[in-house]
Amino acid sequence: MSDASTTLRLIQNEVRRSILERLVREPHYPMQLAELLEVSQPAINKHLKELERGGLVTKEKVPSDKGGPPKRIYSVTQAVSVRIDLGPDLFRIEQRDLPKGGPMRLTGILPEAARPVAEAVSGRKKIAVGEGIEHLRHLTESLGALDRQRDALIALHQQVQSRISAAVDADFEAYEERALVHRLLESPNERLDTLALGQHLGLGRQEVAAMVDEVGARLERQLAERAGHVLAVKPNSDLRWWLGSVKRRR
């Protein structure tokens, strides 16, 4: 299993991309790939080892047609989606594993427009090329619509982030405090990893605790001012879960 960093490193090489482009269609022997890509077989073997080490391809030995020793054949078995969003106030790299299982297992997740395709191909190992082209055309249109919606959501996310960044720059003078707030913004549904933050900024545990106290109090005042009322809670209340868990100063 590879992560996004490994996948990006592997596919940045043009020869490896060409290898993957052919392997996703059907398994190939190293000698086949060398002839098709006009690259030496030792170089092909080196790239295949890198791809195998990164978890993108697998190999198996199959009997030789000419009665010789078994031959190595390579194929792609891992199905992933790598997404990169980059722009002002926007940087996100994510790799997601595609759902496993047959077409009918996907119907609960698929948009309504794509479910007829899953129902049409379920239980069939082969479909005619003409029928398949029609299904793929329909799915490509559905993917295009989803991509446009996702693009709009990402753009809106970027606009919101940009406006927040302007407030962060105005409200927090210290770089370390701004870094803490940005960590909260990057993962708003997750508890802040104060240990990782301290290592990133080169701060000790007590320094991080002091900064969390200061930034947390300031953010809570801003929330109270916006809501028009004040809510008093203990410092260790679960209402402050988003600030993580650090040992408080004494």
Image (spheres, rainbow, N blue to C red):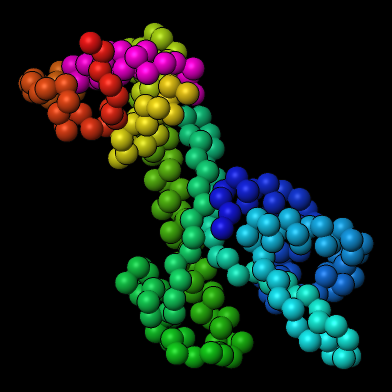
Taking depth in this image into account, of 207 and 78 the one nearest to the observer is 207
Q: Quadrant of the N terminus?
A: bottom right
Quadrant housing the C terminus: top left
Image location (x, y in percent) of residue 81: 53, 57
View extreme (top): residue:
173
Could you tell me if residue 106 is visible in this image? yes
Part of the protein shown in magenta = 200-222
Would you say residue 162 is visible in this rendering?
no
Percent of width and height locating residue 102: 44, 79
Query: Which image quadrant for residue 159?
Result: top left
- Quadrant of the image occupied by residue 204: top left
Residue 43: x and y in percent read 87, 58
**Residue 250 to residue 109: above or below:** above
Q: Does residue 69 belong to the magenta stretch?
A: no
In reply to whether residue 212 is colored magenta, the answer given is: yes
Q: What residue appears at the point 15 percent right and 18 percent down from the top-left corner?
A: 225
The image quadrant of residue 54 is bottom right
Q: Is residue 18 above or below residue 113?
A: above
| Tag count | 0
